[in-house]
Amino acid sequence: MVRTPSTMSPLGIDAPDFCLVNVDGREVARDDFRDAPALLVVFMCNHCPFVVHVADELARLTAEYMARGVAVVGINANDASQYPADSPERMVAEAEARGYQFPYLYDETQEVARAYHAACTPDFFLFDKNRRLFYRGQMDDSRPQSGIPVTGRDLRLALDAVLAGEDPPASQHASLGCNIKWRPGNEPDYFG
């Protein structure tokens, strides 16, 4: 299993815009959440063992924080022509099976993933009320076959801090996962 780390973009950068199609067929845009106190963008997919490992806790965690006003979107940017398990049709089934309450969007052109400098699945980007990057990195220390329970600890600490108006966590660790499956010739300069 190849482990690709997140790029750890500089804190304070603005959330790139997006307008993508959700599993229910409607378009969802960044500015649909302009009144939310925070925005969590998760680059994810259906088949990656790292995502599968955290998926149940991700469903619980996001439901909990959405109830507290946090806006959450999942974005799948994988090339579905080469990875059919990540097709939009399979995304519908995955969202239903996992009980995801957040929009699960398909980034067919991969432009949004590139704008966010997303590198792996899962890759987490938490933005504050002004849509400045507050946290990026791992959900917690657990990895497939690590024996460490999935708790969402790091992401929960960041979410609690952003909702309380506190400073970003001083310690932020890169997420690890499968690399985003870029279309041939579409690999960004940070992929390597």
Image: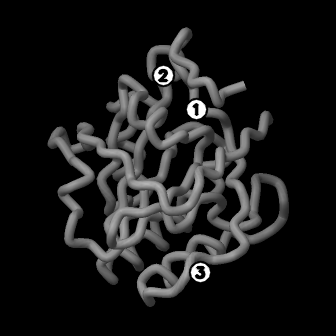
Compared with 67, 184 (above or below) is: above
Query: Which residue bears the numbered disc 3?
Result: 157
> Which residue shows up at 44% across the image and 86% down it?
165
> Which residue shows up at 55% across the image and 10% down it?
184
Gap between marks 1 and 2, in whole Å? 8 Å
Quadrant for the C terminus, please: top right
Residue at the outermost left position: 26
The part of the image, by quadrant, that contains residue 150 is bottom right
Mark 3 vs 1: CB contact within 8 A: no
Question: As shown in the figure, which amino acid type bears the numbered disc 3?
Answer: Leu
Pointer 1 local density, CA inside 10 Å: few below 14, some 14–19, many at least 20: many
Q: Nearer the viewer, residue 187 or 82?
A: 187
Pointer 2 local density, CA inside 10 Å: few below 14, some 14–19, many at least 20: many
Q: Nearer the viewer, residue 96 or 77?
A: 77
Gap between marks 3 and 1, in whole Å? 26 Å
Q: Nearer the viewer, residue 88 or 21?
A: 21
Residue 107 drawn at (x, y percent): 37, 32
Residue 73 drawn at (x, y percent): 36, 55
Query: Which residue bears the numbered disc 2?
Result: 79
Gap between marks 3 and 2, in whole Å? 32 Å
Mark 3 vs 2: CB contact within 8 A: no
Tell me, what colour scheme is on the image? one colour
Pointer 3 local density, CA inside 10 Å: few below 14, some 14–19, many at least 20: some
Mark identifier at residue 180? 1
